[in-house]
């Protein structure tokens, strides 16, 4: 992949502030420059990251699943793509075994008759498939999630049915040695059309799963079911019904008991044509009773992944839109305490990519306590002007989502390319935007969030280092105008500082 370097002029103090905060921002072209590649989930261990990836194969006709392995610095160690034409493999989840190998669940698609077969596969620590077991059944289309039980065997969540008539959820316990079925039970949801979700296994070997379902008046709801260690349905709880996008319901066991559940929902319950889907996070005890709940009522958020950190914090990832009218969409992270208080949320933008950010698809805690995310990022195609394609994306930030002090007021820019191996990550925090640029008159400055500091100011310098203009910023400032119309034509530096510390420098052009 051609590496494009976007020159972002920053003073050395910004680079120095980032020292000690180990970050990663890398993209990987798995299957050639004209083929789209995506990462859907990520695992971390003491020696690196493993990504569940997908790439178009057979001349772009089908999608084939695979894996990518990197070290802790994000350098690629190996990648594997699995195909068995005319079939295509879709991986839905995977887990790491104690011996360093992997179990993968998903569905094999046969294009000739448009049929699906759920499967479980064992993959070596080097990405080589050692065995695969299929579960051919008219009531099973795809294994949508996979978890490991306390005894080391596997629990698989299957969705199937007959289109337009009914859908069912089936849970299987599978032997870790060969994937053979130990037991299989249909979940008694009491619903005609439950949708895909996630499952988690508790310490007592009981199973809890979350999923969506259609509700009256074109609404949707979500439900949680609990199963015994033998797969018997113990109870099903239905929760709030309202306008919602059809996104997966996420569920994770918490270290001190109970589960966290997240899903997309119009928490304001406004008319469909005006809805803005936000997320809803809820903690349930092991009997399905609500301990706390959090509605996000600001702007639009879509949740694509969730993880629970070692200290019990809950981290969500996904997509959000710009708070600036007409602005781009961002990748997004949010972190919550075990008590349901939002510690922070951060937005990440790719200014050089020809397309808006598509959102982080998954997040996990890194060995150093930071957060590692995966997804896909759009880049250009070498030798094909105007052509673009998607590449696997791996990013990592600190445990607070920041790169430098004070990022609670900022978004973070992430480019779709990187420098040569060993070069610095092309990542910087951004607190404001300046427009129009180039400018022929006054320059408008808009902060992404109101200024929180009492000692903040903006300065303008020419390329000889002479200060031409400066203004202190009152706490709460969100926008101001700079009289650039009186400057001579040329290049200028707009500097934002707090307490003498430079946080952002932008080049602006006076026409």
Image (spheres, rainbow, N blue to C red):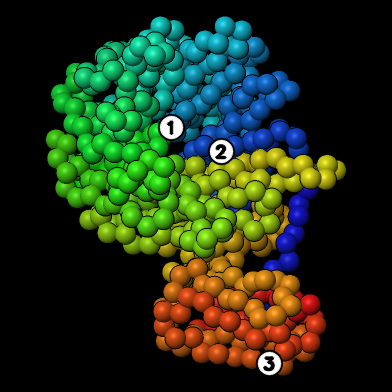
Query: Sequence order check: which comes first, mark 2 or mark 1?
Result: 2
- Camera-near label (1 vs 3) is 3
Is residue 444 positioned above or below 72 on the image? Answer: below
The span from disc 3 to disc 2 (Cα, nearest Å) is 47 Å
Q: What numbered label is drawn on residue 468?
A: 3
Identify which residue, 39 or 318, lies in the foreground: 318
Residue placed under numbered mark 2 in the picture: 39
Which residue is rendered at x = 27% and y = 14% of the image? 186
Is residue 380 positioned above or below 233 on the image? Answer: below
The image quadrant of residue 105 is top left
- Camera-near label (3 vs 2) is 3
Residue placed under numbered mark 1 in the picture: 95
Q: Position of residue 103 (x, y in %)?
A: 46, 26
The span from disc 2 to disc 1 (Cα, nearest Å) is 15 Å
Is residue 316 positioned above or below 412 on the image? Answer: above
Category of crowding for the residue at label 3, using alpha-carbon neighbours closer than 10 angstroms: few (below 14), some (14–19), many (at least 20): few
């Amino acid at each position: 992949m051609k590496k494009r370097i976007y020159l972002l002029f920053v003073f050395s103090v910004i680079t120095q502030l980032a020292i000690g905060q180990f970050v990663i921002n890398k993209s990987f072209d798995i299957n050639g420059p004209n083929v789209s590649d995506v990462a859907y989930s990520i695992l971390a261990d003491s020696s690196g990251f493993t990504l569940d990836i997908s790439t178009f194969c057979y001349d772009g006709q089908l999608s084939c699943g695979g894996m990518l392995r990197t070290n802790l610095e994000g350098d690629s160690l190996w990648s594997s793509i699995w195909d068995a034409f005319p079939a295509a493999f879709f991986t839905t989840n995977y887990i790491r075994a104690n011996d360093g190998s992997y179990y993968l669940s998903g569905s094999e698609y046969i294009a000739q008759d448009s049929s699906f077969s759920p499967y479980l596969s064992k993959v070596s620590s080097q990405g080589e498939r050692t065995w695969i077991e299929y579960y051919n059944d008219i009531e099973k289309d795809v294994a949508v999630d996979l978890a490991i039980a306390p005894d080391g065997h596997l629990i698989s969540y299957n969705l199937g049915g007959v289109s337009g008539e009914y859908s069912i959820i089936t849970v299987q316990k599978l032997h870790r040695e060969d994937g053979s079925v130990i037991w299989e039970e249909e979940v008694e949801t009491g619903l005609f059309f439950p949708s895909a979700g996630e499952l988690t296994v508790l310490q007592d070997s009981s199973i809890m799963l979350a999923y969506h379902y259609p509700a009256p008046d074109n609404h949707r709801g979500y439900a949680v079911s609990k199963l015994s260690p033998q797969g018997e349905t113990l109870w099903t709880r239905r929760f709030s019904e309202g306008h919602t996008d059809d996104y997966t319901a996420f569920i994770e066991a918490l270290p001190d008991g109970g589960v966290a559940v997240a899903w997309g929902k119009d928490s304001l319950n406004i008319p469909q044509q005006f809805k803005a889907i936000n997320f809803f996070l809820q903690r349930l005890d092991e009997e399905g009773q609500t301990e706390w709940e959090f509605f996000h009522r600001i702007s639009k958020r879509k949740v694509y992944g969730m993880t629970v950190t070692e200290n019990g914090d809950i981290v969500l990832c996904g997509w959000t839109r710009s708070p600036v009218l007409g602005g781009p969409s961002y990748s997004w992270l949010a972190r919550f305490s075990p008590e349901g208080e939002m510690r922070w949320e951060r937005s990440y933008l790719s200014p050089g990519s020809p397309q808006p950010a598509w959102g982080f698809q998954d997040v996990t805690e890194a060995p150093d306590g930071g957060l590692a995310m995966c997804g896909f990022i759009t880049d250009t195609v070498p030798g094909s002007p105007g052509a673009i394609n998607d590449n696997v994306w791996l990013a990592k930030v600190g445990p607070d989502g920041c790169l430098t002090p004070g990022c609670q007021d900022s978004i973070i820019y992430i480019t779709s390319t990187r420098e040569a191996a060993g070069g610095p990550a092309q990542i910087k925090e951004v607190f404001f935007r300046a427009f129009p640029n180039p400018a022929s008159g006054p320059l408008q400055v808009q902060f992404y969030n109101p200024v929180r500091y009492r000692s903040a100011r903006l300065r303008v310098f020419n390329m000889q280092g002479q200060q031409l203009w400066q203004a202190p910023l009152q706490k709460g400032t969100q926008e101001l105008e700079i009289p650039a119309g009186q400057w001579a034509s040329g290049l200028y530096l707009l500097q934002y500082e707090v307490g003498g510390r430079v946080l952002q420098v932008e080049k602006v052009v006076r026409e």
